Amino acid sequence: MRWWLAGPDDRGRTRWIRRFDPSFWLVDFPRPMMASVTTEGDETLVVDVEFQRRADLAGLIWESADRWSHPLCALTTRRDYRGLVWRFRWQSSGAVLPLDAVNGPVLTIEGRDAGGRLRTWYVRLWNYAVGSPADAEIALDFDALAGGFLLPGEADPVWAGDIDRLFISLVPPGHDGVDAPLPAVAQGQVRLTNLLVDGDGAVLPAGEPGLPPHDWRLCTAYDDLYNQTPERILTQALLLGWRGAITHYLGMSHFMALQPDGAGGYVVDPARPLCGPAMAWHRDFLARAHQLGFAPILSLSMELFAAHCPADWAQRDATGAMGLTGWVPPSALLSPCQTQAQAWLCSVVAAAMALLPAGAAPAFQVGEPWWWVGPDDRPCLYDAATAARWQLETGSPPPAMLDVKGSKSAAEQAYLDWCGARLAEATAGMVAAAPAGTVSHLLFYAPQVLLADRPDLARANMPAAWAHPAFDVLQLEDYTFVTTANQAGQARARAAVAGALGYPPTQQHYLAGFVLNASDAQVHWPLIADAAAGSAASQVFIWAWPQVARDGFTPFALDDEGDAAMPAFHDVRFPLELGFGATGGPGFSTQVVVTGSGAEQRNADWADARLEFDAGVGIRSEADLERLVSFFRARRGQAHGFRFLDPLDNSSAADGGAPAATDQFLGQGSGSTTRFALVKTYADAGVEDAQLRRITRPWPDSVRVAVAGVEQVAGWSVAPGGHIDFAEPPPAGAAVTAGYRFDVPVRFAADRIEVSIAGWRAGELPSVPLIEIRED
């Protein structure tokens, strides 16, 4: 599988999208209210709302700059709305203030006036409506649009030439801006139908990549997608080649119905598993996914937004503190022993699975179930329900553990085993809540459970009752190991899971990802893609669409990737006798612009050089000619790369001599990173801008490694691609260095060479150009 991080400039083929296309609208709102936007056909969008407070306001949003689509699928930015006439039918029902109300629907327009000054206009939709306050035809001519409550007396003319955003505000009856609860939860709906737009700029180009299907699968998550339409997400996924199964996480913060907690906050409502907007969104998402040929796997975890978690439902440590994740704001983990919490989870499973359309194969995943251990290393095994059940079954209080690290006593191990059995009971209950015939999945996150410094934690968080065939499919996730280059931890975890749970590769999936921050995309996506490509699982999933779209992650398959007999690189060396006679060297690409005054501006296009050689001048005999032709045919011309020994630069030592373990600085230990890439630095004293070269083809037997200046004779290995893998991570702050000899990966630069015995005897030398392959 190949991939790249696409940007806005990479968009190729385009399609035409009507301005105000229903699928590109967004919603947003303050919590604890909820809203969603879905589509019906080409000219209808539907907004479902659930208000909780008198100050609640939902915005139905159109942005001139498409910030949410994948770069290859995005709409072209156009902020000029002059000449446009937008028409639609407005229909509202339930708890939404009507068009003629004082705080009724307003179109807020944010942009700049003709002088470039920031401006906001408030256009009362009732001023442009024909019909009733709940059912009207609305026409908005952007060349004759005015804000203001009463027209023409309070008219504030809109200048539509530079608009950033438009949004229609929806509020409940009783809305007065006071941050206080409504008498009851208020549900409503708005439908915009017959959406039509005319005039200059009525259609916009959008990307249409049309990539062929590939083998990787996609993950989605409602908490990050609640503001978008399912049509937008799934259509773009299809255009980018995603097919087959989609693991869809219901989330932990937006799907649930809420009720007041009596203290000014809101907690989940056990009587309503999902809120109305989430039900509408998921019903549309699942129906569209099935229609497009996707196979959703619905996922639910035991994680819940802490602000909405009933106090007695949460896991707690031995001091009584709630187990909170590192998210801001934090989430909590539900106790496997809390019967109300588990009953609510099971009701959510049943309600979500009931939204699947007829004919869709039911599949459900229990997502990352565990007993939480926070950054203070305190296991959260001591909520009241858990402690009470242990006391009832054993007649004694549970042993208090304030630190999960290190080996535990026999009594502590017994308690951890018991907690593991309770976790297995809870996950079995969630699976049983799904309909008969559901394919069950367990998502196991190895880094949280299988760290080397807490060997007994697996007793609680990888219970024996999960072993094959408890679930139909085991889905393994280990992104912290991957993104910190902790290959040793990854290997240990995979071996431990395989040994303890015993799922064959045909019943395993691998979840690769994720990239939390966009600033890490260039570093983390290559690691994630390598881990995905190296997985032996039957299916590989990429977590998740929000990050895929944000960073432009674009996997694709080439036609020749299925031909196992055609590897891209042959790990053989060009004949040494021919290579030592070759001519050539490194080359850069630099743009030089000479101004009228003679001054220069220079821009380096490449961070690293690319080597080129001509091996023809190394031929000294007719036997050399025969060897060259034989080697060329075996490589099928340009088709396969091979090793080439650069006679002038093949050692890590600055003088080209024998390598030493301290020759080249590879990086500093972090306490978790176990993989370091081999590099060679070219620099002069006093010059800060050193040139860094990746070494991908070292001579394995020549490699020497040091940590903090001390050569390491064991505890590491040379991995493919020019990496050093440590069995244990070097200490934080310790310098990791290495010495080695190396070859250059090259290929023939042409598919044809011309040789002649007569020409050779007459003194003519064939041209045999070689060019370096960039492997990293």
Image: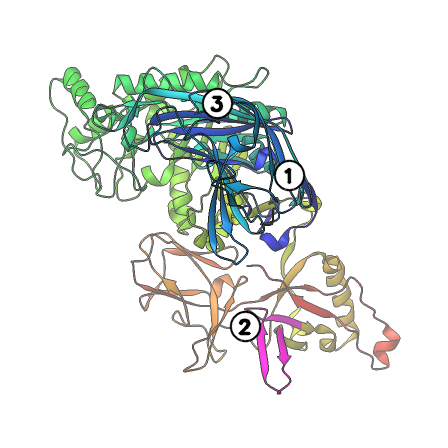
Res. 469 visible in picture: no
Residue 602: quarter of image: bottom right
Image quadrant containing the N terminus: top right
Separation (CA) of disc 1 from disc 2: 68 Å
Which residue is the extreme one toward the front? Answer: 153
Nearer-N-terminus badge (3/2): 3
Residue 600 sits inside the magenta stretch? yes
Does 83 appear above or below 740? above
For the residue pair 362 and 669, the one nearer the viewer reads as: 362
Q: Which residue is mark 2?
A: 650
Q: Which residue is mark 1?
A: 85
Identified by mark 1, the residue type is Val
Pointer 1 local density, CA inside 10 Å: few below 14, some 14–19, many at least 20: some
Residue 510 sits inside the magenta stretch? no
Nearer-N-terminus badge (1/2): 1
Q: Which residue is mark 3?
A: 189
Q: Position of residue 474 (x, y in %)?
A: 45, 29
**Magenta part of the chain:** 590-612
Q: Position of residue 751 (x, y in %)?
A: 78, 61
Separation (CA) of disc 3 from disc 1: 25 Å
| Residues at marks 1 and 2 touching, judged by CB atoms closer than 8 Å | no
Pointer 3 local density, CA inside 10 Å: few below 14, some 14–19, many at least 20: many
Pointer 2 local density, CA inside 10 Å: few below 14, some 14–19, many at least 20: some
Nearer-N-terminus badge (3/1): 1
Identified by mark 3, the residue type is Gln
Disc 1 vs disc 2: which is toward the camera?
A: 1
